[in-house]
Image (cartoon, helix red, strand yellow):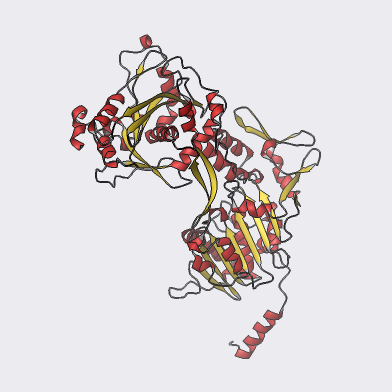
Amino acid sequence: MKRSAVELFDEAWERGRRPEPRLTVSEWAQTHRMLSPTSSAEPGRWRNERTPYLVEIMDCLSASHPARRVVLMKGSQLGATECGNNLLGYVIAHAPGPTLFVQPTVDVAKSESKQRIAPMIEDTDVIRELVSEVRERDSGNTILLKEFRGGFLALTGANSAKALRRMPVRYLFLDEIDGYPGDVEGEGDPIAIAEKRTSTFPRRKIFLVSTPTIKGLSRIEREYLASDQRRFFLPCPECRNMDWIRWSNIRWEEKKPKTAKLACVACGTLIDEWHKTEMLAAGEWRATAEGDGETIGFHLSGLYSPLGWHSWADCVNEFLKAKNDPLQLKAWINTVLGETFEERGDSVDPMSLAARVERYPAEVPNGVGVIVAAVDVQGNRLEVFVKGYGASEESWLIAFHTIHGDPAKDETWFELDEFLKTKFTHESGQELPIDCVTVDTGGHFTEEAYRFVRARHGRRIFAIKGGGDQGKPLVGRPSNKNRYHVPLFVLCVDTGKQTIFSRLSIGSPGPGYLHLPDWIDQEYIEQLTAEKAIHKYVKGRGPVKQWVKIRERNEALDGEVYCLAGLHILGMAFIKALPERAARFSIKKEALPLKETEPEHLLRKSWVGPRRKNWVTGWRDGF
């Protein structure tokens, strides 16, 4: 039966006068939330007992709680994303109001809407009946806008200033804030812009969530440190002492990650992980700082991940694989421990390097599995660096050669060509050739460098160029969009320099260690340490790390980066086979079989062209 306009008005009036329900987000989730099989590994009804550590976080986001700002700095495999989605469901069903959900980019927001928000609406009855139906021409339910009775949910990216400042909102969910741009479209910090949208709502809720990144640059760490810094304390099953889980308290037998246990700091008991479920159920959040009085902050590492998700053994296994690689270790600390990565080796004392030079027993010592060369093109010379690499990218400087001459002249490049045919004597007596060469094409002699490389592609001589990106792998896929159609590898120089400086800080031979021969001089060492990393504010990007020279010449550092790039161009299969190759090279010359074949299947076939006919003289055709 249809109701009159007066009846509808009276119903709406009464609904508006009612106080907001005392129901908390965790209670709502326990009662109503359904996890979709399309977005959850454990579909079905939400159970607070599965992730007890999320209950207090959700309750702080409830309409009845006085907190305005809630911060969660987290690792992975913890259910934090669904915690935020529970807030959105709660708002739609029980405490409606204008809501903004911000992801790092608009594209990520669209993906989140399709893969998580839409399934949540569809599978949770109390939400589905409140959100406008999807119609082809109905703007009430689109990918980036969900209208419901009493409010709306808008989704956008932190890279859209217009969307961030478009409307006032009561609820603001800022997800993965460490991935936000520093300055969105020249209008400032996207977090500050978004938070201003809530200023007209005295009972606003702002939820900031992220996996942290680099110490000193991480937004989520900054927000957490301004809060009361809560940690989840668990009881020891043996002595009942309450403490939070630290990585330093995880113990395991050498090379046996599956033996991982948690050591109690009070009684020393080694706690098996099967106790984790009962420990989490008895856990409690405790503040460890006073904070700013407005922000409640929570920290969760992946070590709290429930049984069946991400085990302590998994964490140990990943750590053992990552510990010798600065980039992998950074990702592990960020995503598993939920902590910022403190970059070390941003500068190195030249005196410390001078004190560790060593005399090799031969040009190429045992341990080397491949020889790589790099050519740095200068205005009046070519600088050639020759490096040997072994297991876990331990490396030895084999040779450093300067070719004096104008790079615009043919004879300079001809002399380079002759040097690159040099074979180096291994400790075993074998004569080893250079397996790969990278040539810098980013200077004033780009045309000459391209022509040189084009004629020698079959000898694994590659064109490289330094790029300005950050946070990417050292070497990506090449592009041949140049007039000579030469495969060009654009390097992430920031990654290369960070890797080199981290390895210069390694104090003893082993994985990643850089061996320096006693024939290098002080000038070479000064060049190797000629830069340092600084944190600088850049318009349009916010605070970023930049490498700056602390002296004019830095060719040795560039040479290290270019050689490492050559190794990575050969491919991961080749790098993994270095221990086997090094063992083969260490066999005495007289003990070798008559023919020694190169395992070509280990090389990246797509980068290796056919050997050109008459390449000795044919290289001149390009000039």
Above or below, 229 relative to 149? above
Image quarter where the C terminus lies is top left
Q: Position of residue 527 (x, y in %)?
A: 46, 32
Image quarter where the N terminus lies is bottom right
Residue sitting at 53 percent across and 37 percent down? Answer: 326
Q: Viewer-proximal residue, 561 or 52?
A: 561
Residue sitting at 57 percent across and 27 percent down? Answer: 507
Along the horizontal axis of the image, is 578 left or right of 342? left
Residue sitting at 42 percent across and 35 percent down? Answer: 558
Q: Position of residue 560 (x, y in %)?
A: 44, 32
Q: Viewer-proximal residue, 82 or 434?
A: 434
Q: Position of residue 460 (x, y in %)?
A: 31, 32
Above or below, 24 relative to 602? below
Image quadrant in which you'd find residue 423? top left
The answer to whether residue 332 shows anywhere in this view is: yes
The answer to whether residue 109 shows anywhere in this view is: no
Number of marks: 0
Q: Position of residue 163 (x, y in %)?
A: 51, 68
Above or below, 490 relative to 436? below
